[in-house]
Amino acid sequence: MSKEASELTKKKIFDYCMESFAENGYSNVGIRNISKGTGLSSGAIYYHFSSKNKIAQFLYDTAIEILLNKIVSAVEKSSNDREALKAIIFTLFKLTDEDPHLMKYVLYTKHKDFLPEALPICSAKPFEYIKKFIKAKIKEGVFRNVDILIASSLIMGPVIRIIQLKMEGVIKEDLIIYTNPLFEGISKSIFKNNH
Amino acid sequence: MSKEASELTKKKIFDYCMESFAENGYSNVGIRNISKGTGLSSGAIYYHFSSKNKIAQFLYDTAIEILLNKIVSAVEKSSNDREALKAIIFTLFKLTDEDPHLMKYVLYTKHKDFLPEALPICSAKPFEYIKKFIKAKIKEGVFRNVDILIASSLIMGPVIRIIQLKMEGVIKEDLIIYTNPLFEGISKSIFKNNH
DNA sequence: TAAAGCAAAACGAACGTTCTTTTTAATTTT
DNA sequence: AAAATTAAAAAGAACGTTCGTTTTGCTTTA
C-alpha cells in the first residue's frame, strides 16, 4: 500500500480522535468507538498507534505545537506592544473558530487524567511563551508592575474564559468579533499608559 | 443501628469521593477504589447510593449549593459595589484555600462527561447569580457599558484563572493574599470611575 | 514474493452492579 | 432485666459487560 494511503488512515484516526476526545472525553471513547467512527478495525488502529494512550499523547503534542507556532508568528509580525497583545488574543480566538475540536482538546481537557506526565496546560510551551512576553513587558515598563501571576491572569483569564464560554455553547457566534472589545477591557487593567 | 452512624458513613463516602473524583477524575475512580479508600464494602456503598453516578450528582448538587450560599451572603453583607465585587473574589479564593477538593470538583471537572444533564458550570446557579449582579451594575452605570459576556469574562476570567493555577500546583500559597491585587486589576477594566 | 496494511476474532482484566448472607443495634416481649 | 425479634447496615462473592490489547491470518502493494 502506498505511503500516502497509510498517512491518510493515520490522519483519519487523528481527526476522529481529536473530535471525539474533545467532545466526549477520553474515557468515554473506546477503541470500538474509534473503529466505528473511522471505519477501521481495531487491528488497523493498533498498527498505527501502539496504544490508545499514545494517540492522546500524539494529539496533545501536535496541538501544542500548532498553537505555539501560531502564537509566535503572530507576535513576531506585530510592530508594537498593543498590536502584539491583540494578535495573541486574535490568534487564539481565530483558532477556536477554525478548529474548535483542537482548542477544546487543548484548553478544555484534564490531560492529567489520562496523560500522567503531561504538563499542566498553563506550563505548556505556548503559554510559557506568552508568560515570557508578559514578563518582558513588565520589565520594560509597558505593563504595570504587578506580580507575574496577577498579570497573566488579568490578561489570559478573560481570553480563556471567552473561549470556554464558546466551548460550553453559551456563545454561538465566531469569537473573533470579541477581539477588540475584550482587548480594550484587558488593556485598561494591564497597560501603564492607556493613551 | 443509629441514624448518626449511618449519616457518618454517608459522609465518609461523600468526602472520599469529593477528593478522589477531584484529584483523579471520575472515570479513574472505581467502586473498588472507593471501597478501599473508605474502608467500606461495595455493598455498603450501594446501600447509601444507588449508583456511582448518583454519588457524583450528589456531590455536584451539594457543592453548587454551598458555593451559591457563600457568594450570596458575601454580596449581601457588602455595603457598596466595590466591596461586593471584592467579596465575591475573596469568597471564591477563601473556599479554594479551605476546601480545595470541592472547588476542584466544581471548577476543574468536565461534568458533562459523566453527568449528561448537568448544566455547564457557567450556567449553574452561583455563576448565574454573579452574572445578574454584573448585569445590574452595568445597568446602574457602575460598570462600563460593555457586552455582558465581555464584562463577566473580564471579571470572572482572572479569578477563575488564579484558582486554576492553584489547582494545577503552579501557585503554592493561599489564594486570599491575591484578593487585593487582583481586585485592583479587575477594577481598572470594569469600573467606570476608578476614583 | 516479501512486506506492509488491515480485518476479525479472541484474551484477560477491570468495570459497575446485584445478590445473598452476616453483623449490628435498637425495640419489643417476657 | 434478660431474652427474643426486627430491621437497618455492611460485607463480599459473583454476574454480565465492556475495556484495551493481542493474535492470527488474509489482502494488497512494491
Image (cartoon, coloured by chain):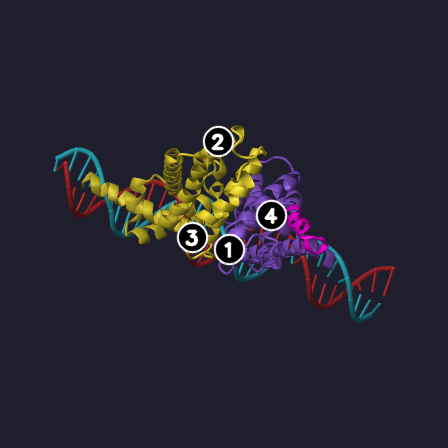
Chain colours: A yellow, B purple, C cyan, D red
Task: Name the residue that disc number 1 marks.
Answer: B147
The amino acid pointed to by label 3 is: Asn
Secondary structure under badge 1? Answer: loop
**Tag 1 and tag 4 share a subunit:** yes
Mark nearer the viewer, 3 or 2:
2
The spot of residue B1 in percent (x, y) is 72, 58
The label shown at residue B72 is none
Among the two numbered marks 1 and 4 on one chain, the one whose residue lies closer to the N terminus: 4
| Horizontal and vertical percent position of residue B186 | 59, 45
Q: Closer to the observer: label 2 or label 4?
A: 2
Range of magenta residues: B75-92
Which residue is labeled 2 in the image? A132
Q: Quadrant of residue A63?
A: top left
Mark 4 nearby-residue class (10 Å; few <14, some 14–19, many ≥20): many
Q: Provide the secondary structure element on which disc 2 rests.
A: helix
Q: Which residue corresponds to mark 4?
A: B103
How much space separates mark 3 and mark 1, taking CA atoms? Answer: 31 Å
Label 3 in the same subunit as label 2: yes
| Mark 1 belongs to chain | B
Q: Which subunit holds the residue at mark 4?
A: B
